[in-house]
Structures are given as C-alpha cells and as structure tokens.
Image (cartoon, rainbow, N blue to C red):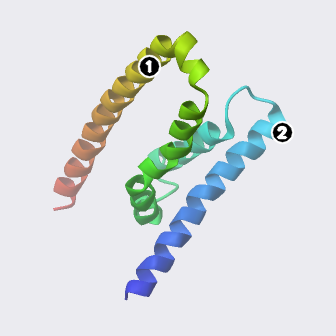
C-alpha cells in the first residue's frame, strides 16, 4: 500500500513538471517576457478552475513539494552569503524587497486558501 502511494506521488510530481515544461516551451516558442514556470502555473490554474484537471490528480504530489519547499531556498541563501558585497551596497533595499514580497505572498496565499476552502465546503454541503 505504501509503495502505491509513493508511485502515485511521483506520478503527480511528473504531471506538475510537465506543466512547467509546457510553460517553458511556450515561452521559448513565443518569446514571452515571463518565466516558463509562471506560464505553466497559469495553465495549471486554468485547468483546475475549468475542472479539466481534477485536484486529486495532483494533490499528493503538490503536498509533498510544499512540504520540502524550504529546501529549495538553501541555494539562494548560500549564494547571498557568498557575495557579501551585494549586501553591503544594496542590503537594506534587498531585505526590504524580500520582506515586502514575502508578506504580500503570505497574505495573498491566505486569502486564496480561504476562498478555495470555502468553495470546497459549499460543494461538499451541496453533495449531501
């Protein structure tokens, strides 16, 4: 049973990675001034909102990736420590930008999560 869950999670991560690759391909072909990951995320969001993609198809993989998200910030932190001259000249501006963007991201994520949770509860109540 555990092996099946691991395989399902890996398959779901592959699905998420395919969306990233499609977004990167679109940026390469069209020359859009956006990162491919953002385009892939928009495509995934559109698929979820239009119910083309069922949330259960990516739920376990997304939960796993969110659980290990902090690991992805380690290289950026090490890079900043490696170049202290960046912090000496523009350190205050950089820290302020990171702080503001983090607070804004946390706020928007919270609002969006409350919206999705409320919508999910309404859907569950309608099914009963």
Residue 33 is left or right of residue 107, and the answer is right
Q: Is residue 121 above or below residue 13?
A: above
Residue bearing the label numbered 1 = 95
- The residue drawn where x is 58% and y is 62% is 15
Q: Quadrant of residue 102?
A: top left
Residue closer to the observer: 6 or 121 = 6
User: In the picture, which quadrant includes the C terminus?
Assistant: bottom left
* Residue 61 coordinates in the image, percent (x, y): 46, 63
N-terminal-most mark, 2 or 1 = 2
Q: Quadrant of residue 111?
A: top left
User: In the picture, which quadrant includes the N terminus?
Assistant: bottom left
Q: Which mark is residue 9?
A: none
Residue 92 is left or right of residue 119, and the answer is right
- The residue drawn where x is 30% and y is 43% is 116
Residue bearing the label numbered 2 = 29
Residue closer to the observer: 57 or 5 = 5
Q: CA distance from mark 2 to mark 1?
A: 35 Å
* Residue 49 coordinates in the image, percent (x, y): 45, 45
């Amino acid at each position: 049973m555990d092996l099946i869950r691991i395989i399902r999670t890996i398959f779901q991560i592959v699905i998420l990675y395919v969306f990233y690759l499609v977004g990167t391909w679109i940026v390469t072909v069209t020359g859009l001034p956006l990162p491919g990951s953002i385009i892939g995320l928009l495509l995934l969001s559109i698929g979820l909102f239009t119910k083309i993609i069922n949330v259960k198809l990516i739920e376990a993989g997304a939960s796993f990736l969110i659980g290990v998200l902090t690991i992805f910030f380690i290289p950026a932190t090490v890079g900043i420590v490696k170049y202290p001259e960046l912090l000496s000249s523009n350190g205050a501006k950089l820290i302020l930008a990171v702080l503001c963007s983090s607070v804004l991201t946390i706020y928007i994520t919270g609002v969006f999560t409350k919206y999705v949770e409320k919508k999910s509860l309404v859907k569950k109540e309608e099914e009963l």
